[in-house]
Amino acid sequence: MSDNTLSYVRADMLGAEPPPISNKSVAGWLQTNLLATPKDVVLTIIALAVLAFTLPGIINWLFIQASWVGSDRSVCATIAQGGIQPDGWKGACWAFVQDRFQQFIFGRYPIDERWRVILVGLMLIVLLVPLLIPKLPHKTINAVLLFVVFPIVAFVLLRGGDFVGLQRVDTPLWGGMMVTLILSFVGIAVSFPFGILLALGRRSNMPIVKMFCVIFIEVIRGVPLVMVLFMANVMLPLFLPVGWTIDNFLRAVVGVALFASAYMAEVIRGGLQAIPKGQAEGADSLGLSYWQKTRLIILPQAIKVVIPGIVNTFIGLFKDTSLVSIIGMFDLLNIIRLNFADTTWITPMTPLTGLVFAGFVFWIFCFGMSRYSAFMERHLDTGHKR
Amino acid sequence: MTDSTVTAPPPKRETKSLIYDPKARSIFFQVLTLVGVVVAVMWIAHNVSSNLARTNTASGYGFLNGRSGFDVGQSLIAYSSDSTYGRAILVGLLNTLLIAVTGIITATIVGFIIGIGRLSKNWLIAKLCMVYVEIFRNIPPLLVIFFWYSGVLAVLPQPRDAIQGPLSTFLSNRGLTFPYPIWGDGASVIPIAFVIAVIGAIGFAVWQKKRQMATGKQLPTGWISAAIIIGLPLLAFLAVGAPLTFDYPVEGRFNLSGGGTIRPEFVALYLALSLYTAAFIAEIIRAGIKGVGKGQTEAAAALGLQPNKTTQLVVVPQAFRIIIPPLTSQYLNLTKNSSLGVAIGFPELFSTGSTSLNQTGQAVEMISIMLAIYLTISILTSLFMNWFNAKMALVER
C-alpha cells in the first residue's frame, strides 16, 4: 500500500459556509420574520393593507389636519357649520383640549385656590416616587407618611375650612383628573389592607369568620361596580340614623373601596394558597404567634407571588373610577363629556377629540403601572419561582 | 398500656388559662364577630325602617304590578309605557342577556384571533396584535363605549342622508336599518329541523368516536357535522317552499321607513364590550398556549404528527385547561360591564332597574331584585364553567 492511493480522502479544507441568511442583512430579517412561508407573505400583505388603510387617516386626523390653537368652536368647525375650516374637514380639535385643560385637571375647584391641589399633587409625587424606587432607604417611614399622614394633610388642604384659615371648598366642586386620582389613591390605600384581612379571614379555620368573608367577597364580586356605587349612593343614606347625611363623594369612595377590597382579597388569597404548608408549620414550630407568622413569614412571600395580580387590580381600579360618572360625579371622563354640550366648543369633532385625550391620559397611567409591575417582578425574582 | 402508669401525671388543667387555649380563643373571636355583625345589621335595619317611615315609603313588592310609565329604546318582547315595572325589569334582563351572549361570542372570536396573532412568527402581525392588546387593556371600558357612541356613531349622517350599504342596509345616526325577515307559513319546521340536526350531529360524533376507537379509522367529523347542522334546516326551508319575504327599508323624505333597526346604543355597547374584552381574552389565549410545554410539541413531532394535528390534538386540549378559569371570569366581567349601557341609555337591567327605582322610590326592594338577578347570573355561569372545567381537567392517577 503506497501513500495517496485513497483517492476519496479529501486533502484540502472546505471554505467557510456563509452565515445563516437571517443574521446577515435586512433582507434576511425580512425573509425570516415577514416572508418565511407563502402564508406569511399573505399575512404580511394583509397587515400592510390594514396599516395603509388606517394609519394615514389616523395620523392625518391626529396631527396634520388637527386644529391646534383657538379660543372657540370656529377653529374646529367647517364653513357650513359656522367655522373657518374648509368643507369636508376632519381633524382633531386640540384647541379645545388646550382651552379646557385646567378644567380637566381641577374640575370646578375655585381658580384662586388651585395652588392647594397642585401642592397636594407635589406632595404625592415627593412621597410616592421614593417609595417606588427599590434602592432608596426608609421605606417604613415613607409608607407611613404616604398612607397615614398624607391623606389627612391632603384632605385638610383640599377641603379647607375656617379652622385652618383656608376657604372651604366642598366636594361637589371637586372634579376632573383630581377626583380620578383621589378615588384611585383612596381605593388603593384602603383595598390593600382590607383585602389582606378578607383573604386571611377567608382562609381562617373559624367557620363564622370565614362565612362572613366569603359572603362579602362573593356578593361584591358577583355584581357590577355600577351596582355597588349605586347601592352606596342610594343605600348608605338609608343605613344611617335619621338626620345624618353623608357626602356624595364619600359614598363613591366607600363604593370603590369596598369593590376593590373584594377583588384584592381574591388576588391575595391566590398568593396565600401558593405558599407551601411547610412555611406555616415551620413558623409554628419556632413558636411564632398567628400574627407574627402571618406578618413575617406568610405575607411577604404571598404578596411577592401575586404582585402582577395586585397591580392588575390597581389598574382595574384606576379604570373603574370612570364609572362614578354614572352616579353624577365629575371625574376626568365625565368632565370632558360635560364640555361636549358646551356651546363654546360644540362641533362634530369635539367629542372624539375629548375622548381620545381622555383615553391617552388613562392609557399613560395604566401602561405606566403595568410596566412598573413588570420591573418589580424582575427585581423581586429571587429565583424561587415555582 | 402498662407504660402509662409509669409516666408522670398529666399537667393540671386548671392552671392553664383559657387565653392560651386556641379552641376557646377561636370560639371567643367568632362569637365576638357574630355579635358585632348582628348588632350592625340590627342597627342598619332599624335605621332603614325609621328612614322609610319618615318618608312614608310603603314596603313590599306590590309596586312591580304598577304601570311603569316610561319607554325603552329597544326591547325583545312587547313593551310599552303602559306595561308594568315587572315587565320593564324583564325587558332589561333580556337586553342584558342579549348583550352578554352576542358580546361573549364576538369577544371570544376576536380575542382568539388576536391571541394567536400575537404568537405568530410574522413580526408585523405579532406587533399589530400587541398594539391592539396594549391599547384596549389600558383604557376604561366606559371610554370605549363613549368612543363608539359619541365619537363615531353620533357623527354618522341623518337618516335622510344615510349611507347605503350592501343588501339594502342603511347606516345613519339612528342606527343600522336592514331588511327585516318575515317568515311565512310552515316556517316553524326550520327551528325543529335545526334541533334535530344538532342532535344528529352529536349522535354522529359519538358514533364516529366509537368507530375510531374500534377500527382506528377517522372521518372528518367537523365538516360532516357542519354539513348536517346547516344542510338539514336549509332542506327543510326549501321543502316547505321558502316561506321568507323581506320588509325592505325605504328612504323617505326625512326618515327611513320599514325594515328592522339596530339602535346605535346597542351597536356602541356591543362593539365596545366585545373589543375591550377581546384584548383580555387574547392575553388569556396567549398565556394558555405558551403554558403548554415545548416538550409536548416536540414529542408530538417525534410521533410523526403533522403541525396541524399537533395543534389540534396536543396543544389546544392542554391549553384549554389553562384558559378556561380566567376565560370564565372574563365572560362574567363582560356580563357585568353590560351595566355600563346605562351611561348611553341602553335599556339593560341596571338601566331599567334604576329608572324604576327613581320613579317608585322603592330602594330596598329594587336593589334586592337587581342584586338577586346579577348574583344568579354569576352563580349560574360559575357553576356551568366549574362543571366544564372539571370535565376538561387532567385526570391523574
Image (spheres, coloured by chain):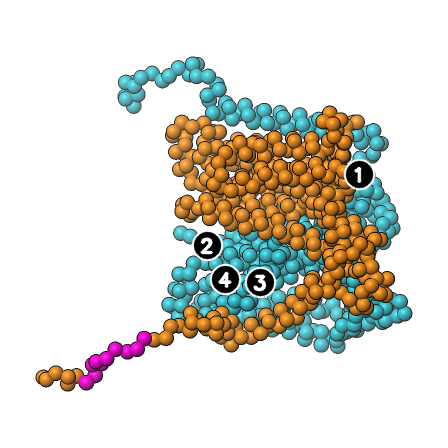
Chain colours: A orange, B cyan
Looking at the rendering, the stretch of residues picked out in magenta corresponds to: A7-16
For badge 4, the amino acid type reads Val
Please check whether the numbered discs 1 and 2 fall on a single chain.
yes
Query: Which residue carries the number 4 mark?
Result: B316
Of discs 4 and 3, which sits in the foreground? 3
Residue at position x 81%, y 67% from top?
A86
Please check whether the numbered discs 4 and 2 fall on a single chain.
yes
Query: Which residue carries the number 3 mark?
Result: B129
Foreground of the two, B114 or A11 = A11
Residue A242 within the magenta-colored segment of the rendering: no
Report how far apart the C-alphas of labels 4 and 3 lie in the structure.
20 Å
Which of pointers 4 and 2 lies earlier in the amino acid sequence?
4
Of discs 3 and 2, which sits in the foreground? 3
Where residue B54 appears, x then y in whole percent? 83, 29
Please check whether the numbered discs 4 and 3 fall on a single chain.
yes
Report how far apart the C-alphas of labels 1 and 2 lie in the structure.
49 Å
Report how far apart the C-alphas of labels 1 and 3 lie in the structure.
48 Å
Which of pointers 4 and 3 lies earlier in the amino acid sequence?
3
Residue at position x 76%, y 54% from top?
A96
Where residue A365 appears, x then y in whole percent? 62, 49
Subunit ID for the residue under disc 3: B
Query: Which residue carries the number 1 mark?
Result: B362
Which of pointers 4 and 1 lies earlier in the amino acid sequence?
4
Q: Residues within 10 Å of mark 3 (few under 14, many from 20)?
A: many
Report how far apart the C-alphas of labels 4 and 2 lie in the structure.
13 Å
For badge 1, the amino acid type reads Gln
Q: How crowded is mark 1: few (under 14 residues within 10 Å), some or many (20 or more)?
A: some
Query: Which residue carries the number 2 mark?
Result: B394
For badge 3, the amino acid type reads Cys
Q: Residue A285 carries which label?
A: none
